[in-house]
Image: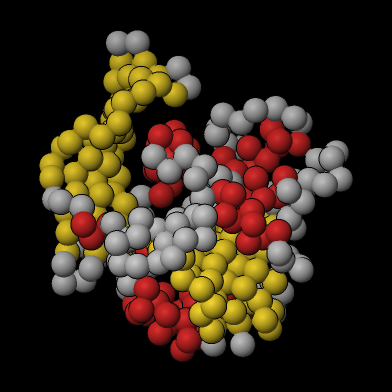
Amino acid sequence: MSRREGWHGWDEYAPFYDWENARTLGRRDIPFWQGVAARARGRVLELGCGTGRVSLPLAADGVDLVGIDRSAPMLARAVERAGRARRGESSDGRGLAAARRVAPIPNPQSLIPVFVRGDIRSLPFRAQSFAVVIAPYGILQSLIRPRDLADALDSVARVAARGGLFGIDLVPDVPKWREYRNRVQLRGRSGGADLTLVESVSQDRRRHVTTFEQRYLERRGTRTREHRFDLVFRTIGVRAMTKQLEHAGFAVEAVLGDYHGGPWDERADVWIILARKG
C-alpha cells in the first residue's frame, strides 16, 4: 500500500470543512490576514485557499487575490461562495462542478478572487508576480515530507516579488494530541442534516506526523450515511521553519504568538512567521 500523502482526504472533507471550522477556528484569524494583505502593493497569493474562508473576506476588502488549492471539491465550494457574494447572497458553502474565474461584484472596493487548482510545490505562476504570499492555518503542515516543504518554499520564493512578504501560520498543538479511538468531537446540523464527527488520532513520533481519522455521520430522517477519510499533518517548529525559509531566500522579520501581534514563545497557541523575500 502506498504511503498516505498530506493532500489525501481533503476532497472528502470539503462538504464538512466550513461547518467544522465555524465551530473550532471560526473567524479568529481573518482580521490578522486582512491586516497583512492591506499592506500589499500588488497581488496576494493564498496557499491552500480551500473553500475561500480567508480569500473571500480579503477580496471583499479590495485585495487583488489569487487562491490556489489542490482539491477541486474545495475550490468548487469557494466558487459557489464567490458567486453568492457577487449576487449579494449569504453563502451556505455548497459548491459548483468546477472552479472558474468570477467577475467582480458591483461594489468597486470589493473583488472576487481568482481560484486556481494546482500544486503549491510547483506554483503555476510567473516569477516575482506576487507582493504577498500567505499560508494560513497550518496549510504547510499538510506537506508531510521534508522535500515537499522545501519544494514549496522554493516555489514561493520564485513567485514572490523582491521585498515581498510571506506569512505562515503554524498549528503548534498537533503533536500534543493524545491518541484515542472513536471519540465524538462535534454534533450539530448543516443543510437539513444532523452531523456527528467521530474522530480517532494516531501519532508517528519519529516522523512528527499526526493522523486524524474522521468519520462523519450524516443523518437525514431515518437514513444515516457515513463518510470516512483521514487528514495527516506534520509538525515543524519555528526554528526549523526559520532555517528553511532562510535557505529559500527569505529573511524572517517577526514571529508572533497570537492573531493580535503578541510575542511568540513555545507555549503560544499560534505560531506565525512573517518573512521578507531578499
Residue 23, placed above or below residue 195: below
Quadrant holding the N terminus = bottom left
Residue 79, image x, y percentages: 64, 43
Residue 13, placed above or below residue 144: above
In the rendered image, which quarter is residue 76 located in? top right
Front residue of 184/220: it is 184
Quadrant holding the C terminus = bottom right
Residue 99, image x, y percentages: 63, 48
Left or right placement of residue 180 versus residue 173 in this view: left
* Residue sitting at x 25%, y 49%: 212
* Residue sitting at x 84%, y 40%: 107
Left or right placement of residue 94 versus residue 266 in this view: right
Q: How does the figure colour the protein chain or chains?
A: secondary structure
* Residue sitting at x 43%, y 43%: 25
* Residue sitting at x 76%, y 36%: 86
Front residue of 100/83: it is 83
Q: Taking the image as drawn, is residue 4 in sight?
A: no
Residue 140, placed above or below residue 242: above
Left or right placement of residue 83 versus residue 192 in this view: right
Front residue of 169/145: it is 169
Front residue of 67/178: it is 178
Left or right placement of residue 182 versus residue 90 in this view: left
Q: Taking the image as drawn, is residue 205 in sight?
A: yes
